[in-house]
Amino acid sequence: MAKRRLLIALLAPLALGAAAVSPSDIPSEGSVMNLEQCRQLALANNKDLRRSAQQIKVAGYEKDQAFAAYLPSLDFAGGYMYNQKGISVLESDQLLPIKSFNPETKGYEFDFVKNPIDGKPVMVDGKPIPSQVAYLPKEALSYDLHNVFFGAVTLTQPIFMGGKIVAMNKITGYAEQLATAMHDNSAQDVIYAVDAAYWQVVSLKAKQKLAVSYVNLLDTLSHNVSLMVKEGVATKRDQLTVDVKLNSAQIDLTKVDNGLVLSRMALAQVCGLPVHTVFTLADEDAETISTTAPVAKSYDMQQVYASRDDLRALELGVKIYKEKETVARASMMPNLALVGAYSFSNPNMFDGFQKKFNGMFSVGAMLTIPIWHWGSNYNKLRAAKAQTVAANLQLDNAREMVDLQVNQASFKADEAFKTFSMTESNLAKADENLRCAQLGFRDGVMTVDNVMEAQTAWLKAHSENIDARIDVYLCDVYLNKVLGRLDVQAAQ
């Protein structure tokens, strides 16, 4: 059942179609590809990896963007405004009284019209009448503001932002490393998927050969029994029993043939090739297996933690949340910035009212001190601290799961190696058992049932040996994966 589930999982992506690759990347028909070449194709064509590579670029750009906050920013703002009406300071023409110098008082005094009889100022509506006035027409203080152009060039240099700029630079740096770690972790998943598909094809090719050999054995037995029926030393029942077994073996061979074709399609899809690409695998005709070294029982977990890209990503996540605390704390601290600007307008009032561009420079400092926000900024800091605690707990839990994962993979790899060794020893026994049964049948001391039992045992022994051989490879690559030893850069 496990092998069947693995085959279904490998064939499922076929419904999505193969990734688009250039014709030069497609191997020619009959070409031989080894495992390393399949890995390289998959890493080069996998869309998820290509997307994560773009995420690394995004993180790099955001890092450069955060660094720019250290530097002064230069901005320009300008505009145009049309006003329906102009502006007039005066409602109407005005007559302004003027003063004359009085030598006696040595000061300026208003000169009023005086009554020649008593010498007192003439009053009109309770106010004295000036003898001299200055005429100020309304048009003199009327301004045309129908078309107004304005603009400003502003330079801002942050001096102290509560540590927010430094924290954001650290966050973007960690984010770039996190994107790289996630990319490498995804690449390891792709390598494992390629290995599983590759060895599935190798396994089915070996089982195809085994099924052909089994069909040939039954076909030979069927021919011999038919001759014995003619000679009267075997019954019709013996013939029918062998023929039923032969038909069943031929059906199994057809299933293996179809499974092999679909497995090749699945491997092509994982490699990013069109599903109908035909190529030969370097290991599909191998008769022996290169045994691996004995599996270790214990490992330096600190080294494993340092090698795991997923744990590295979680550690970077903790650092990012820690820096977010600094960003939240900065919202409760003063902010100081140096500001310089050059502003201009048309019309301008710098030297009377003139309808032309003119402007001025200004330099200053801007200080912002948060005083009271009803606990908003403080709760923001508390939330950031809680996120840091949650990230640390997630990291601790992940390390515990890695401990369990490493031990399980180690035991599984050791079990697979031992199982393969036992199946190797069973092969010779099954071959000898089959040989003895065939000789005994030929000498008349064995029945047809005895021969078919020996053939079934022979088929089972060889099938288990194939499964064990492939399991050794898969368990070894999985153990290297959980130990963080898969060299992604070498495969690219």
Image (tube, rainbow, N blue to C red):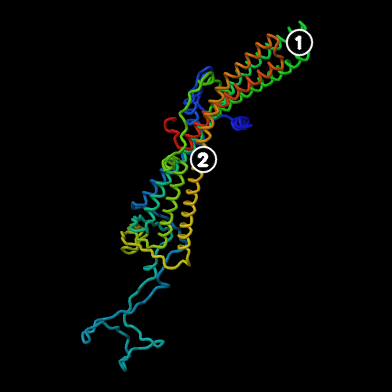
Question: Where 147 sits versus 11, above or below?
Answer: below
438 displayed left or right of 19 = right
Q: Residue 222, image x and y in percent?
A: 71, 12
Q: Which is nearer the eye, 425 or 490?
A: 425
Rendered residue at 39%/56% (across/down): 164
Looking at the picture, which amino acid does disc 2 mark? Gln
The picture places residue 311, in percent across and down from the top left corner, at 46, 44
Which element carries disc 1, helix, strand or loop?
loop
Quadrant, the C terminus: top left
Mark 1: give few (<14), some (14-19) or many (20+) Cα within 10 Å. some
Total number of numbered discs in the rendering: 2
Q: Which residue sits furthest bottom?
A: 118
- As drawn, is 78 to the left or to the right of 116? right
**Residue at (38% x, 54% y) in the render:** 165
Q: Is residue 50 visible?
A: no
> Which numbered dot is residue 447?
none
Q: Which residue is mark 2?
A: 405
Between disc 2 and disc 1, whose residue precedes? Answer: 1
Can you identify the residue that label 1 sits on? 234
Q: Circle 2 — which element? A: helix
Badge 2 vs badge 1, beta-carbon distance below 8 Å: no
